[in-house]
Amino acid sequence: QKVNVDTGRMESLKFPRLNNINDYNQGMNQVDVADQLRGTYRFDHWVRNRKWWWAIFLWWFRVIITNSYIMYLSVNLYYRV
């Protein structure tokens, strides 16, 4: 919502967008959440000076931890544990 300069009231603005952009934004929800979580909680800043396979291993480990966390949240919301 934005404030209309002429009237001073809050108004909703609607923007037209292409269907394929809307489909992409609706379908990529969980992938985007996983990318945001992996980017926010990084613990591998020291990897730059190590062997090359450490980066691959820790990326794989972060993907597994993040996906298991997302699955944990979805299961708890579904069963209301």
Image: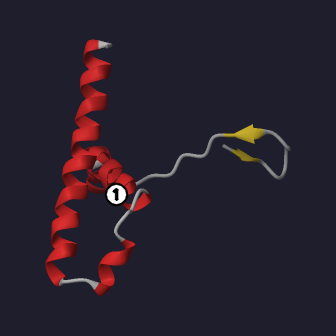
Q: Amino acid at mark 1?
A: Arg
State which quadrant residue 29 falls in.
top left
State which quadrant residue 8 falls in.
top right
> Which residue is at 41% across, 56% downward?
41
Which residue position holds label 1? 38
Q: Position of residue 75 (x, y in %)?
A: 24, 24
Q: Is residue 4 above or below residue 69?
A: below
Q: Left or right: where does residue 30 sit relative to residue 54? A: right
Q: Is residue 2 above or below residue 35?
A: above
Q: Position of residue 15 (x, y in %)?
A: 50, 51
Q: Is residue 39 above or below residue 52?
A: above
Q: Nearer the viewer, residue 25 or 36?
A: 36
Q: Is residue 36 above or below residue 26?
A: below
> Which residue is at 60% across, 46% downward?
13
Residue 46 visible, this angle: yes
> Which residue is at 75% across, 39% downward?
10
Q: Nearer the viewer, residue 38 or 21?
A: 38
Residue 23 visible, this angle: no
Q: Position of residue 65 (x, y in %)?
A: 24, 48
Q: Left or right: where does residue 57 sit relative to residue 38? A: left
Counting labels gives 1
Q: Nearer the viewer, residue 10 or 58?
A: 58
Q: Position of residue 66 (x, y in %)?
A: 27, 48
Q: Quadrant of the C terminus?
A: top left
> Which residue is at 54% across, 46% downward?
14
Q: Residues within 10 Å of mark 1 (few under 14, many from 20)?
A: some
